[in-house]
Image (cartoon, grey):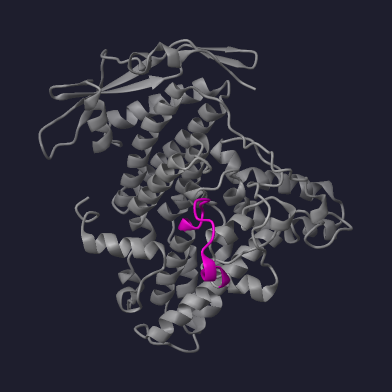
């Protein structure tokens, strides 16, 4: 926390989000010396999203993010980083292998010319990564995750695929013939960070910069499902590649966001992997090998007899009156998911910080718990009838992980609980207001008549000792905090 408040760290962190860094301060001799810029950017992600939300609330014509969509985008971001718990970045690892065995020229790592060449090389490589992700169905199966949101705000930038990294690394390998891995490792991160802030509707036009840079306006077009938006504006930091290769389009009509065929769910495992199931069914539908390969290696809209990328005139017509998928769910559940989401974020952060000293089985167990929790949250947001059972099982797992020290209550959340007067002396009572106990499931209805409480008594032991968690009879129903008005029946449509 003290580091975040340091003016120098703060200034450099903000500049990193916009690629406003100099070669002198971001050149390193060894890959091991390259900072984890993306991991360090978490406070800036949160800060910029908070600013966007405040400005959205102050502007009458600006959309406010949907909480369910926000949770899903954040969940996708968490899942996208999970492979890093078990293997080093494929992009950097593959790059280092080619560099060590096949490089033809060794450009100086501390040269400004090398830095700027890498800037252009990474952005050029990203253009083709991104274009192929839209034009090859097998890679689109991964990339569609990022386009599945029907909203467009900074949280959308976090909605990343867990599997796209397994194909993107190939496009950067030509750089490894001359550019040192440490320089590549810097720019692959900055290129990603730059693309965060362009996911907003608050910035409309940036004047002359629109000719060179990828801006929010250009990227809004890329996220649209309007016919004029399909397969346009692939650039990362620069838009010049789209202008050169004929894939550029200006923002004109109102952009309607999301997939051509919306998936209408916030269940994160489905969001991440549903398209692979669709590919498998399409692959088996055809009998000839040519058509089977066409399903994988041609565009998402391709059908036999159609052009390689399909016929965009067959895309469902957009009227501008489309409403995003936004199921109605009680405020009580939104607060519940928010509090448990904060706990899960703490668990997630601790897991990444401790992965090198933890047994692989422990890492695997905690990864499974995180994935299960994110799935359960999606079921709650979707108001599925099975959400109660999923959440009950998740709460039991959480209590056991707390009991045996695999999880701790994050400091800020503990402070919030203390503020609710459920912390007594040396005991911290964590109220887990589960929807599981008294949920009555009817035909297309879920009635929330009351909330059970799985209560955990955390004994605050002496400094330096780990906390022990015990079951306690001290419970705090959620209805006591939020009021009975928030616990009324709600229908599903």
Location of residue 431 in the rendering, given as x and y in whole percent from the top left corner = 31, 21
Q: Quadrant of the C terminus?
A: top right
In this rendering, the answer to whether 320 lies above or below 436 is below
Residue in the image at 62% along x and 69% along y: 128
Splitting the image into 4 quarters, where does residue 406 fall?
A: top left
Between residue 430 and residue 91, name the one nearer to us: 430
**Per the image, is 197 magenta?**
yes
Give the residue at the far front of this rendering. Answer: 60
Location of residue 463 in the rendering, given as x and y in whole percent from the top left corner = 10, 37
Between residue 412 and residue 252, name the one nearer to us: 252
Res 190 visible? yes
- Residues rendered magenta in the picture: 196-211
Q: Is residue 293 left or right of residue 405?
A: right
Location of residue 438 in the rendering, given as x and y in whole percent from the top left corner = 47, 11
In this rendering, the answer to whether 117 lies above or below 482 is below
Give the residue at the far right of this rendering. Answer: 305
Location of residue 377 in the rendering, given as x and y in whole percent from the top left corner = 48, 31
Between residue 18 and residue 147, name the one nearer to us: 18
In this rendering, the answer to whether 390 lies above or below 210 is above
Q: Is residue 108 left or right of residue 66?
A: left
**Per the image, is 266 magenta?**
no
Residue in the image at 68% along x and 53% along y: 253
Q: How many marks?
A: 0
Res 36 visible? no
Give the residue at the far left of this rendering. Answer: 462
């Amino acid at each position: 926390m003290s580091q975040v408040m340091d003016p120098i760290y703060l200034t450099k962190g903000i500049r990193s989000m916009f690629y406003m860094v100099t070669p002198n301060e971001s050149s390193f001799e060894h890959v091991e010396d390259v900072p984890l810029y993306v991991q360090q950017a978490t406070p800036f992600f949160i800060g910029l999203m908070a600013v966007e939300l405040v400005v959205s609330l102050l502007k009458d014509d600006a959309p406010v993010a949907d909480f369910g969509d926000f949770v899903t985008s954040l969940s996708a971001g968490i899942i996208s980083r999970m492979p890093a718990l078990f293997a080093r970045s494929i992009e950097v690892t593959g790059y280092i292998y080619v560099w060590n065995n096949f490089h033809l020229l060794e450009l100086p790592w501390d040269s400004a010319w090398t830095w700027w060449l890498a800037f252009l090389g990474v952005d050029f490589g990203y253009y083709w990564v991104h274009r192929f992700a839209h034009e090859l169905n097998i890679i689109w199966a991964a990339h569609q995750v990022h386009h599945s949101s029907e909203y467009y705000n900074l949280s959308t930038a976090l909605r990343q695929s867990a599997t796209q990294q397994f194909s993107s690394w190939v496009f950067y390998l030509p750089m490894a013939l001359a550019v040192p891995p440490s320089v590549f490792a810097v720019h692959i991160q900055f290129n990603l960070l730059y693309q965060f802030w362009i996911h907003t509707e608050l910035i409309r036009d940036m004047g002359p910069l629109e000719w060179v840079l990828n801006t929010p306006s250009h990227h809004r077009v890329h996220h649209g499902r309007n016919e004029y938006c399909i397969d346009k504006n692939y650039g990362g930091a620069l838009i010049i590649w789209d202008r050169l290769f004929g894939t550029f389009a200006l923002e004109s009509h109102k952009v309607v966001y999301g997939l051509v065929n919306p998936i209408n769910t916030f269940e994160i495992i489905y969001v991440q992997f549903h398209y692979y199931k669709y590919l498998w069914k399409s692959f088996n539908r055809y009998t000839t090998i040519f058509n089977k390969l066409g399903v994988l290696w041609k565009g998402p809209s391709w059908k036999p007899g159609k052009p390689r990328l399909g016929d965009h005139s067959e895309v469902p017509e957009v009227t501008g009156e489309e409403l995003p998928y936004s199921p109605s769910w009680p405020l009580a559940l939104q607060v519940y998911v928010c509090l448990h989401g904060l706990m899960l974020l703490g668990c997630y952060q601790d897991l990444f910080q401790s992965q090198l000293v933890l047994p692989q089985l422990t890492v695997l167990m905690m990864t499974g718990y995180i994935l299960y929790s994110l799935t359960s949250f999606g079921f709650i947001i979707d108001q599925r009838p099975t959400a109660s059972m999923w959440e009950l099982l998740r709460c039991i797992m959480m209590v056991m992980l707390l009991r045996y020290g695999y999880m701790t209550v994050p400091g800020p959340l503990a402070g919030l609980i203390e503020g609710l007067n459920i912390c007594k002396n040396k005991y911290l009572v964590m109220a887990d207001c589960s929807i599981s106990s008294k949920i009555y499931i009817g035909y297309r209805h879920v009635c929330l008549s009351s909330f059970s409480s799985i209560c955990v008594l955390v004994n605050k032991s002496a400094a330096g000792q780990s906390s022990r968690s015990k079951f306690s009879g001290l419970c705090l129903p959620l209805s006591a905090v939020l009021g009975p008005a928030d616990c009324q029946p709600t229908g599903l449509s």
